[in-house]
Amino acid sequence: MVTDVCGNEEVLVCVDGPVVTITLNRPEVFNALNFETSQQLTRALREVAADSDIHVVLLKGRGKAFSAGGDLVMMRDMIAGGRSALDVGELLTKQAMYHEAPALLHDLPKITIAVVDGYATGAGMSLALACDLRIASEKAAFATAFGGVGLDGDLGISWTLPRLVGESKAKELMLLGDNIDSQEAHRLGLVNRVIPSAQLEEETRLLAHRLASGPQLAYRYMKENIAASHTEGLRDTLSREALSHASLCASPDFFEGVTAFIEKRRPVFNRGFQE
């Protein structure tokens, strides 16, 4: 079961019924990601994955940024000993650990929402794009930023970005690294909604609880089917949909949904296959 994590931890966890808010808690460095932060985030997401009572995950940053990306002190320490001192095997091992968090955000059988109030740059932008939805304030700004330090991008941005904005635009954003404000991000499809900063917390909380009261098993299949469609043809997708659709027709949520529609009332979901 997911429990609240408070205090001086680099990643905070707050449970509100079926909604959990995970907050990157390094405001003094604009929530830059180092190895410890990444590991704490991964642990929190693994706990969420194992908790059937949690339906929606809100991911946010404390202070003036969602996340400024990779930690500059960490990168400075990496180059301190010169190129000959770098251990490529160790780098690969750590990179694989860093990549667990975005993979979990994308693959969780729960809805993940990035709440962006301020900058989301570099790996911070990658984390936001790994979520199912992105809700931004008018203060939000995005930049790939990797080219500025001679890197190509990580945490899955090479996969998520072109699927959101198209291949050509993704190349432009990656190559130039220009800042994208919230309105342009919304126009491009990087974010789903733009909300005034003063209302962002309340509006995202309401949205999260609305989704948390929906048919969770159906939502899980929606995520799985959309993810699989990237590598499957139409007929494969039709077969996959047929299987999930038939399974859902046998679930109490389907019976409840149809009954509520006929009776002109709001359905009460979340029973899955349980009677």
Image (tube, rainbow, N blue to C red):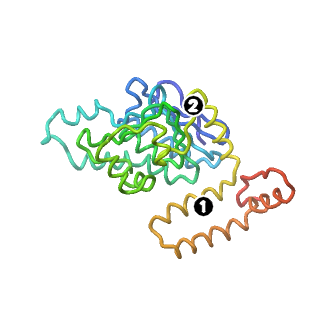
Q: Is residue 165 above or below residue 248?
A: above
Q: Is residue 104 left or right of residue 208?
A: left
x%, y% of residue 160?
Answer: 42, 53
* Residue at the image position 45 percent from the left and 41 percent from the top: 184
Q: Is residue 194 above or below residue 249?
A: above
Q: Secondary structure at mark 1?
A: helix
x%, y% of residue 186?
Answer: 50, 43
How far apart marks 1 and 2 lie (CA) works out to: 32 Å
Report if residue 35 is visible in the image: no
Image quarter of residue 75:
top left
* Residue at the image position 41 percent from the left and 35 percent from the top: 37
Q: In the rendered image, which quarter contains the N terminus?
A: top right
Q: Amino acid at mark 1?
A: Tyr
Q: Amino acid at mark 2?
A: Pro
Name the residue nearer the viewer: 139 or 113: 139
Q: Secondary structure at mark 2?
A: loop
Check disc 2: other Cα within 10 Å, few if <14, some if 14-19, many if 20+: few
Q: Is residue 274 left or right of residue 87?
A: right
* Residue at the image position 70 percent from the left and 47 percent from the top: 213
x%, y% of residue 266?
Answer: 80, 50
Q: Is residue 154 above or below residue 33?
A: below
Report if residue 155 is visible in the image: yes
Q: Which residue is denoted by mark 1 in the rendering?
A: 221
* Residue at the image position 55 percent from the left and 61 percent from the top: 224
Mark sitting on residue 196: 2
